[in-house]
Image (tube, rainbow, N blue to C red):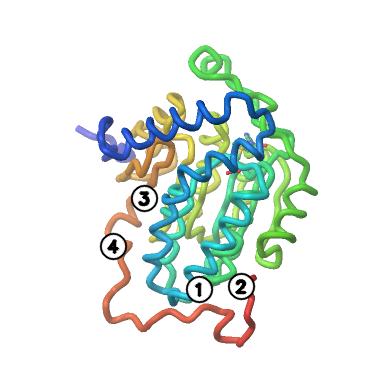
Amino acid sequence: MRSEHSSTTSVSAVPRRTLRSLCYEAVRGVYSLLTHRVTDPLSRQRIRLCGVVWGYWPVLRMRRLDLRRRFQLLRRFLRIDWNVVHGHSPSEIAQIALAIDRQSDGRPRQFVEAGCWQGGSSAKFSILCRLYGYRLHIYDSFEGVGDLTPADRAKEWDYEGQYAAPEATLLGNLDQYGERSVVSTHRGWFSETLARGNAPAEISMAYIDCDVAKGTRDALAGVVPALSPDGIVFSQDFHIGPARALLTNAATWSTFGVRQVEVKQLGRRLAMVRCDRGLSRSPEIPRHQPPYRSPERRDGQERMK
Ligand SMILES: C[S@@+](CC[C@H](N)C(=O)[O-])C[C@H]1O[C@@H](n2cnc3c(N)ncnc32)[C@H](O)[C@@H]1O
């Protein structure tokens, strides 16, 4: 018999040898050939972008934005890709953009980003948050990846101290490429911020990208209890064994009082998690809902650059 707090976890993963994974391997092969002499990370990223830019195509399906705004959004995303070294792919950001488009109903909402590095993902999320009326809360140590537990150190790559960037870099990139007015920053280790109850109430969406299971667990400890009924958590670390094991283990979720959880793999590195209360709701927009009007349109200000 199940205990009162036991969880059920359903995991759906993309098949290993899909056409998509073959394309991915092909792009990786061409990318390594083209970049093996290029050492500057931004130049490497620009070369890589040529092969992965198609991953943004879901942005063109964002039904709450008119066509002009979808292209403006795409242009701003590409500007960030061209200028800010970051740790994600167009297809991953596009999946999150689509989820916001489907979840949003014009009410003010909260988006949490745990792990921002130089702010490439943050700048993109801030543009989406500005468009859809979310507030973006960014949590980071600004000292790089946190330490591992001894048990994790035996199992996973030790990223400790990597991806350190000062808060000023994040803020500068938000000013130049994003929408700083919708952002709050929270400096510190997740164990001392999010896990200590320093999370906003009613989180609609969270994006965790910290490269280690311990940091993911600390971030979840703050995010999960504060999730709104239709809340969604994205993990950018599903390719990292211990992080994946953490997310797919029912015991993780029962610790947070979650009875039922759905973990869906959306790509090689990205997974989407919906917890019990969120499971009954469809992410699709109900047909009767009127077309969404963004806050910019309502107050007549044109914010898209
Ligand atoms: C891979 S980078 C994030 C990349 C970023 N999301 C992007 O797409 O460009 C990981 C970030 O998580 C932060 N980080 C890792 N572990 C952390 C922890 N336990 N507490 C706070 N920040 C942490 C690091 O400082 C770093 O900025």
Q: Residue at x 38, y 30 (%)?
A: 25
Query: Given the image, on which type of amino acid does mark 3 rest?
Result: Arg
Query: Given the image, on which type of amino acid does mark 4 rest?
Result: Ser
Cα–Cα gap, marks 2 and 1: 8 Å
Q: Ligand 1 falls in which quarter?
A: top right
Q: Are marks 2 and 1 in contact (CB under 8 Å)?
A: yes
Q: Earlier in the sequence, mark 3 or mark 1?
A: 1
Q: Are marks 3 and 1 in contact (CB under 8 Å)?
A: no
Q: Residue at x 30, y 65 (%)?
A: 284
Q: Earlier in the sequence, mark 4 or mark 2?
A: 4
Circle 3 SS class? strand
Q: Is residue 61 above or below residue 218?
A: below
Would you name the residue on which mark 2 appears? Answer: 304
Give the label, 4 or 2, closer to the camera.
Answer: 2
Q: Is residue 103 rendered to the left or right of residue 139?
A: left
Query: Given the image, on which type of amino acid does mark 1 rest?
Result: Arg
Q: Residues within 10 Å of mark 2 (few under 14, many from 20)?
A: some
The mark found on residue 274 in the picture is: 3
| The N terminus lies in quadrant | top left
